[in-house]
Amino acid sequence: MVFSSVIFLGIFLPLSLIGYFIMPGRTGKNIVLLIFSLMFYAWGEPKWVFIMAALTFADYMFAMLMDKVNKKGLKVTLLSMAVISNLSLLFIVKYYNFFVSAVNGVINLGLPEYDIRMPVGISFFTFQALTYVVDVYRKDARVQKNYFYLLLYISMFPQLIAGPIVRYSDIDMQINDRTESMRGFVDGMFRFSIGLGKKVLFANYAGNIATQLLEDNFNGISAAAVWIGVFMFTMQIYFDFSGYSDMAIGLGKVFGFDYKENFNYPYMADSISDFWRRWHISLSTFFRDYVYIPLGGNRKHHMLNIMIVWFLTGLWHGASWNFIIWGLFYGILLIVEKKLKNIGIDISKVPVFGNILVLIIIVYSMALFYFVDFGKMVQATYYMLGIGNRISLGIAEKTIIYKYLWSIPVMVVACTPIQKKAASKIFKKETVHTDILQSVMFAAVYILCFILILNQTYNPFLYFRF
């Protein structure tokens, strides 16, 4: 089930809100939220609910044992077993066939491949499970003695299948001690409507242009059309993923949870480092705190640590060479950027130029991200450099682009903080009038998006596959 669907907007969300708020007591509300979360995941993946519950129980037991033992060696063993159990499932369903194919391609061992359907959002809830066992080991979080509350944390439907990655230590206390309020409900649903609007009004239109140019028209495509198509995919993936994060954060607020921000206008970045401080913040900080720093961080093997982290970041996104190349591409860029700063060259210090150069790099990197087929990825790179094809737009390409031309400047403006600054002035004071205005705006966007969804045929959530 996706947030931008008729089933979710018209049935699931209203019923979950009614059931949650009419249920008295914290325990009762948590039970309702857990039931709806499991139903949400079971909608498309019934069998995986039981596997997720079993994996959560294993983490629950490992953490309980770690909390009781005093010997460091035994704690390390338990932690290792917990990490291996989580990553083993992830490897089997997401990476096994990829690695078997790679091995067979090099030394032809004849290893069998299996038709395994990857469960939606497994990378997200696996990483959340890892934060729990690691945080308990580090004593950054208390052990959760109620298995069903731990299952609630892992399965909570607002952020279950596309993030943000919520660390257990960040919401540990909120599971039992949080406060729902009318202010939280209004603000949360307003934030949800912003995310829904990003998805339905922007991401779907941008994705439609990208698909028509980069897939339907790829064989006869021009250099200009590749750049425009990849640029529109760059818009799509931002509005798609940041929109989902907005919806998750908004629904969390409705239920009394405080999730951290996951995006901070990344296309306004003036350096590659700045971009990754703004884009998918929960993933970047996860790799920093759970991989990069434990490896030694800046203290030893600095460049190797960076490349390991970015290899894993690429691999996290998918079992395909293009994602690995995409991750290593950013790893190399970050190393080059650091080396240049060491000799006094810092593009972030050059107004506007730094932003434009970084945006061009980001758009190109999205070509690496978009084309899973390695041959097409290489071909698109040649085309973007003007090699092997014509430069200017053809008639068919102009027809596709002109149809959606109105949306491009609107999307560009929506990638900036302009609308946030305007909203902060409008809703500067929390009064009955601003509450009414927020509610009216939420209702208007909700109804508009609901109507559009009924008529749209293109409505994917890109990060569900991760």
Image: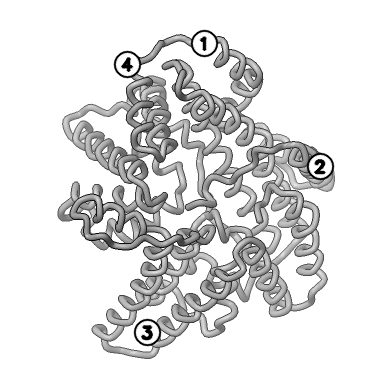
Q: Which residue is the site of mark 3?
A: 66
Q: Residues within 10 Å of mark 1 (few under 14, many from 20)?
A: some
Q: Which residue is the site of mark 2?
A: 447
Residue type highlighted by circle 4: Ile
Q: What is the x, y in percent for residue 237?
A: 52, 38
Q: Residues within 10 Å of mark 3 (few under 14, many from 20)?
A: many
Q: Residue at x 73, y 55 (%)?
A: 8
Residues under labels 2 and 4: Cα distance?
Answer: 47 Å
Nearer to me, 319 or 151: 319
Query: Image check: 155 left or right of 167?
Result: right
Residues under labels 1 and 2: Cα distance?
Answer: 38 Å
Query: Image check: 241 left or right of 34?
Result: left
- The label nearer to you, 4 versus 3, is 4
- The label nearer to you, 2 versus 4, is 4
- The label nearer to you, 3 versus 1, is 1
The disc at residue 387 is 4
Please, is residue 419 above or below residue 248 in the view? above
Q: Residue at x 49, y 59 (%)?
A: 118
Q: Which residue is the site of mark 1?
A: 394
Badge 1 marks a residue whose secondary structure is loop
Please, is residue 228 above or below residue 139 in the view? above
The mark nearer the N terminus, 3 or 1, is 3
Q: What is the x, y in percent for residue 94?
A: 41, 59
Residues under labels 4 and 3: Cα distance?
Answer: 58 Å
Residue type highlighted by circle 2: Ile
Residues under labels 3 and 1: Cα distance?
Answer: 64 Å
